Amino acid sequence: MSRSLRLRGRVVPITALSSADRDAMWRVFRAYYADVTREAFEADLDEKDHVIVLRDSGDASLQGFSTLKVYDQKVEGRRVVAVFSGDTIVDEAYWGQSALHWTFLGFLARLKRRAPLTPVYWFLISKGYKTYLLLTRNFPEHWPRHDRPTSPFAKALLDVLATERYGDAYDPVRGVLSFPEPHGRLRQHVAPLAEDLLAQPDVRFFARANPRHAEGDELCCLGKVDLAFVLRGARRVLMRPLRRLWGRLPSLPSRAPEPERSLVTSDEIDVTASMH
């Protein structure tokens, strides 16, 4: 079967990956990241719990992925669950699609349904503004942000998660990870930060909070998976057929419905850390 150039996503345990899957993941990953090795890639993969596998819906070839690790923590006497996103990349031929977006958000929603009384968070680190926009456009409650300070509990949770995972590389004052040697920098063509983008408050905030992002520094972030998040996702799922219908009706007013700002476009290529 030939390639359709359309992606389908599925969450699978790391242990379910075949050697061919791992080879394909590495080929995609090394094309977009500098300062990476196969040995470090494999070690990082084995440390995770699940992976979102993105395949072409035609020939089933692997064209992208995102690794996931689930933490069960106690912070200030409160139990929380945090999902960490690891190595993530999508081949350029498939940029602009939302399979990764919906598969990941579905994973978070299912996790929340299984633990309705436990706070659930997305813990991510970002060396690129596109990752940060994925957070701000999908999570009503997220930190850090340009319009208000990080809440004390969110700051405490970030400090616990980042220190446990990265040790002295984490600066709790700035909320940024800095490594003595690069741990996987995005290649220059992947997510350049052009001047016109700085007109957006979220992008401007990211650039100010993580001024050394181009050198590989990572901004530590949280998104809360609460009722508002789940309802927003459900609304979008219900609206998708209507939006497609509107797009096929020439008799409708000339102004088409505005696209969902939260849907992943090229943001999919940079949904967080590499080689950590």
Image (cartoon, rainbow, N blue to C red):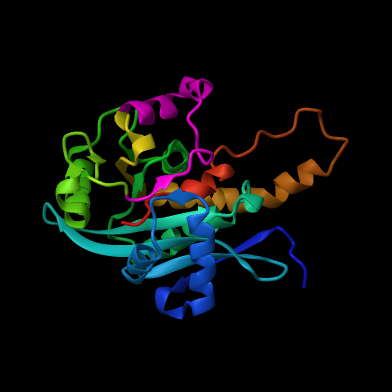
Please tell me which residue lies in front, 250 or 156: 156
Give the residue at the far right of this rendering: 251
Q: Is residue 179 magenta?
A: no
> Does residue 266 appear to the left or right of 135 in the view shown?
right
The image position of residue 83, as x and y in percent, is: 34, 58
Give me the residue at 74% from left, 64% from top.
3
Q: Which residues are magenta?
A: 183-208
Quarter of the image with the C terminus is bottom left
Q: Is residue 166 above or below residue 48?
A: above
Residue located at (47% from left, 39% from top): 130
Measured from the top left, where is residue 45 in percent x and y?
37, 67
**Which quarter of the picture shows residue 144?**
top left
- Left-right relation of 156 to 38: left
The residue most toward the left is 77
Frontmost residue, 159 versus 226: 159
* Magenta stretch: includes residue 205: yes
Q: Position of residue 120 (x, y in %)?
A: 32, 56
Vertical position of residue 54 compared to residue 136: above or below = below
Q: Quadrant of the rendered structure where residue 185 is? A: top left
Name the foreground residue: 8 vs 150.
8
Look at the image and tell me whether residue 232 can be seen. no
Q: What is the total number of numbered labels drawn onto the structure image?
A: 0
30 up-or-down from 18: above or below: above
Is residue 48 something one can see in this rendering?
A: yes
The percent coordinates of residue 5 (x first, y second) are 71, 58
Residue 183 or residue 136, whichever sits in front? 183
Q: Could you tell whether 28 is left or right of 204 in the image?
A: right
The N terminus, quarter of image: bottom right
